[in-house]
Amino acid sequence: MASENVIEEKKQGQALITDNKSENKKKLFIESYGCQMNLNDSEIVASILSKQGFNTTLNLEDADLVLVNTCSIREKAEQTIRKRLQKYNAVKKINPKMKVGVLGCMAERLKEKFLEEEKIVDLVVGPDAYRDLPNLLEEIDAGRDAVNVILSKDETYGDVSPVRLNSNGVSAFVSITRGCDNMCTFCVVPYTRGRERSREPKSIIKEIQDLVDENYKEITLLGQNVDSYLWYGGGLKKDFKKASEIAQATAVDFAQLLELCATTFPKTRFRFSTSNPQDMDLSVLNAMANHKNICRYIHLPVQSGSTKILKAMNRQHTREEYMELIDNIVEIIPDIALSQDMITGFCGETEKDHQDTLSLMEYVKYDFGFMFAYSERPGTPAAKKTPDDVPIDVKKRRLTEIIQLQQKHSFYRTKAFIGKTMEVLIEGISKKSELHFKGRNSQNTVVVFLKEDYKVGDFINVKVDNCTSATLIGTAVGYSENN
């Protein structure tokens, strides 16, 4: 079984709630599955519907509108959504006025078919169409189908101030890009979220300023591929070369955006996710090295340690190029923590390819990771052109070996913190003990320690006394200089 910090698959659905407005009388129940982008999108949806008279609720039975924000990255994720819809159906039989909508990537992939396959569903809305929710709700009331899955050529929600759902009041997400141009053969994201486009820097800084004013201490910059961030006045990244010379000359890339965030908000801690190896530039690493408030942590998906499999996945980098990037990262930021995404059992993967993955893991010794057995996704190039020819029992065995090796490396990395004192941002109470706080260090490792007189949102120094493969256990020794 994977430990807390060695994650086999993404977090399951989460019912979301926020502070409510007294004037709002309708109730919204919203659940989010999959990636952090989906959670941030759900916050945008809650903001849009708040202006339509909806407050969020944790009680499914009381809801006037139930929305599920879906993930299509794996078959198991879609199966989970369909099972959840069965639960909604049982409640709807008791409360027939309740409306049910499907949002996100699964909605974009299946479109009108969702209304045919799941009779309970009243509303189908893709990731770029949430502004149309008020109109779509009117369509439902008029007895018509309500579907909008049109993908945009621009960043869609730059001027929407998200409602922070289930917030700890300390950390928040800010989306900076949408879509993906990389066209990995196994991935549905380019088809469900569209092509890459970036958000105007001024709107990003404004959203961060609003969060800082509300006393948030840590911001995670989000995108399917944050390293591809490029603002040149709007539009798709692929059209950048067609832009005017002025637009090209004044364009802002990800390294420049990081610098802008770090210097504008020196007391705020910044993270970012997700990176793509082929797009990570040395300028990004230098920006991280130059600013203490940019966390020493990079999530750097590799998917396979075999160059042959990487080519079949259309990953645009080789094993050797990835290892060279790792060498550069460690040289420029020696105290960096690294995590991975890994797919085992991809089409045509041999035992040698699997061993290449294990040896790459030994080379990097990731702090933690997200590991999956390959799941064929309809409509992707891999599903259309390449047989899913690795037997399921072989996939499971290889996945187990990858997880076990990651657990070994995670413990190796956490043990290295013992005896060290580090800055920790307190995020809340420990799940296992109300006498302890939990927080994270710059390397994104969870740290647990006695509460004493500190409070949530404080930056404090903690001396590490012990560890598991997932958690550091320490003693608070005072406030940090950043507090």
Image (tube, rainbow, N blue to C red):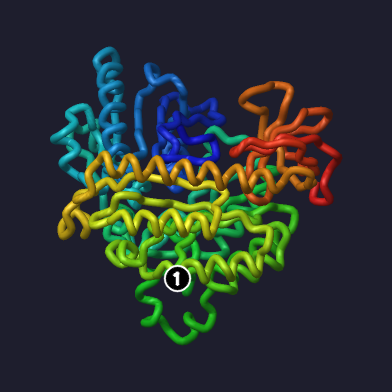
* Residue 186, position as x, y percentages in the image: 28, 55
Residue at 52%, 71% in the rendered image = 324
How packed mark 1 is, by other alpha carbons closer than 10 Å (few <14, some 14-19, many 20 or more), is few
Rendered residue at 50%/67% (across/down): 323
Quadrant in which the N terminus is drawn: top left
| In the image: residue 397, left or right of residue 406 | left
Can residue 201 be seen at all in this image of the molecule? yes
In this figure, what is the number of numbered marks? 1
Report which residue position mark 1 lands on.
Answer: 320
Q: Position of residue 106 (x, y in %)?
A: 28, 43
Secondary structure at badge 1 equals: helix
Q: Residue at the bottom extreme?
A: 245
Q: Establish if 391 lies above or below 177.
A: above
Q: Quarter of the image holding residue 46?
A: top left
Q: Is residue 335 above or below residue 327?
A: above
Query: Within the image, what quadrant is residue 392 found in?
Result: top left
Looking at numbered disc 1 in the image, what kind of residue is underneath it? Glu
In the rendered image, the vertical position of residue 172 relative to residue 468, given as above or below: below
Q: Is residue 155 left or right of residue 204?
A: left
Residue 373 at x, y percent in the picture:
33, 45
Q: Nearer the viewer, residue 352 or 100?
A: 352
Q: Residue furthest top?
A: 94
Q: Is residue 272 visible?
A: no
Looking at the image, which is closer to me, 478 or 465? 465
- Estimate the x, y position of residue 78 in percent, counting from the top left: 28, 38
Residue at 58%, 53% in the rendered image: 207
